[in-house]
Amino acid sequence: MAIIETENLTKRFKKVTAVDRLNLTIERGEIFGLVGPDGAGKTTTFRLLTAIMNPTEGRATVAGYDTVKEPEEIKKLIGYMPQRFSLYGDLSVMENLHFFADIFEVRGTEREERIRTLLHFSRLEEFQGRRADHLSGGMQKKLALACTLVHKPQILFLDEPTTGVDPISRREFWDILSNLHLEGVTLLVSTPYMDEAERCSRVGLMFEGKMIVCDEPEKVKGLVRGEVIELRPQPLPKAWEIIEGWEGALDVQVYGGLLHVFVEDGERGMRQLETLLASHGVTVEGMHQIRPRMEEAFVSLIRREQEDAAL
Amino acid sequence: MNSRIIPIMRKEFIHIRRDPRTLTFMFLIPVIQLVLLGYAATTDIEHLSTAVLDYDRTPASRELIDAYRVSNYFDINYYIDDEEELTRLVDGGRVRAGMIIPAGYSRSLDRTHKAEVAFIIDGSDPNVARTAFSAAQGVGQAQSVELIQEILGIDPEEQPGIEVRPRVWYNPEMRSANFMIPGVIAMILQLLTTFITGAAIVREREQGTIEQLIVTPIRSFELVLGKVIPYVGIAFFDLSAVLIVGVFWFGMPIHGSVPLLLALALLSLLTSLGLGLLISTVAHSQMEAMLLTFLTLMPSIFLSGFLFPIEAMPLALQAISYIIPLRYLLIIVRGIILKGVGLRLLTEQVIAMAIFGAAILTLASLRFKKSLE
């Protein structure tokens, strides 16, 4: 059963169309990842779905309620964590939690029970008396998440929840999200990190307000044209220059000392590359074929989109 | 009361308690205003520094000097020997007035019952000069009357003539403080509340917390009420503090009903809260909110009758004063405190305040709802 459905959802601002005829269906219990470059329209999509903003055209329903006509019903069922830290810095961890519990009218023993659970899983028990603006970035994010969970929302919207957070806190944060997912909460997460996108049941790639691709991570990776060869050439800049000019390469991406070359046929490509680079005096170490990762998939999908737009 | 208003109020009190700057601002401003306007901005002109150049040096001339001294308007600080010195003293701002008694003053008085003295007044401040001018003449006239009575041998009780007996109502001693303190009360109610309301709501926007609040089931009226009620409380605290200091320190009498004053103060808050809310929909930062409040402050001070009487203004400015809410509030507050006027005589002002309040608050609420998008 679809818990979120949009129909040609469009939001135009004075100069730009932030969201352009978006058609999206998210099933109950999904963990949906929204990815795309900055300015692709991810945050605006969240604002439209959380009924903060009204669309210019089209419509959206969340849990069966229309975002324009029945925003109050939606607000009881959802939790939204904006990208920017938006709790009260001068209130302590506990005071912030109590405040949101009061606003959502979570009362009595249920309230105490809920706050205890949230403090426990966000590992903020020791810091409950500390002012929110004296917490580290990772702890602030966890507190923000805890505050949005205080009323047990069915659907959770998280706008880049892990941006600017260290890798360990990021991992912890995703463990929490996985637990929520297992409890049956539907999650909508936007992220700039591709490893996080891989943890989603489905991902949608947004670019200039449009949804370019929307599928399971495995299938998205399958959309990449050609196969990927990884190699460690020496010297790297010269090798990059040669391969860029080679008509057999569909795309070349640099990863540290490594090059990823997209070709039509992996086996043949490797043989051709070997002779090509050797003839220019470039030594190559460990050339092998790899499965494209989410990162390569997105970079090449967006480049293809940009090229199509340029034509 | 609605259950979501209370948590917001509680949160707001925590903000206030933890922000010493706002706290000082809210409690210090009224005190400073009161002291400044109660003492410094007094328009009572007395004890003007005065120099005397007495060429006559007789008992009669000394009697005249004494008459000026006891009038309280003039403090004889300098006895000088020549006119050049007088010029120097006036130029240097050491004296505001100078009296020159010519040689032969006493003799001329004895012979012809007539004498002349010169009185010099520094006219750079017209208010001071005007008071000094009439005081100088008044003292002289009183001296002349005494002289006439002496010559004609009339008992002062039976002296013929028309006696004008002015009687000053409401503020018989004509003390500036009695006039200023009700004004300060009106200012606090209007401007401090406007600014604090504006800033408190803008702060949610500045911090981005408003976005988090919009996705909760909270309604905009709950948010606004929860946020402003603590500040209304503080405004009333300030109001009572100013009233108490006014009565017990400055000796200002309250002739009217205090409950009526408080009730109408509450009515006037509709306007100032509405204005604060309106400012919050325009301003992006607390600084902008402050500047916008300041923009409304100037016309309020100068056109409301707070310092200068409206009747004395050019007609165009008088017309503008009708759209300044402080105008009505000042009449209400001064009327109740100084004149002891009741609701019946203030109907016009109360209706005006109610209309202002309803209009501004409606406009602000509509804009506020839209600005949340």
Image: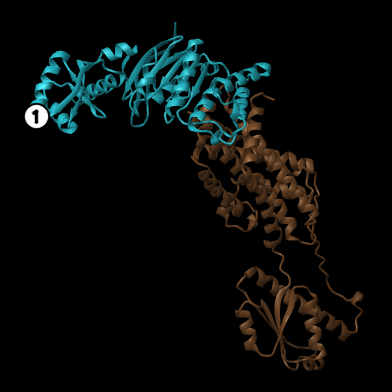
How many numbered discs, if any? 1
**Location of the C terminus of chain A (image quadrant):** top left
Residue at mark 1: chain: A
Write the residue at 55% across / 36% down. Answer: A134
The reply to whether residue B370 is in sight is yes
Write the residue at 43% across / 15% down. Answer: A60
Instruction: Give left or right: position of B288 versus B188.
Output: left
* Image coordinates for residue B204, horizontal then vertical, percent: 54, 35
Q: Colour of chain B?
A: brown
Write the residue at 37% across / 13% down. Answer: A202
Write the residue at 88% across / 84% down. Answer: B150
Give the answer, above or below, for where A235 lies relative to A64. below
Farthest residue toward the top?
A1
**Location of the N terminus of chain A (image quadrant):** top left
- Towards the viewer: A78 or B65: A78
* Image coordinates for residue B26, horizontal then vertical, percent: 65, 46
Residue B108 falls in image quadrant: bottom right
Q: Which residue is mark 1?
A: A280
Q: Colour of chain A?
A: cyan
* Image coordinates for residue A223, horizontal then vertical, percent: 25, 13
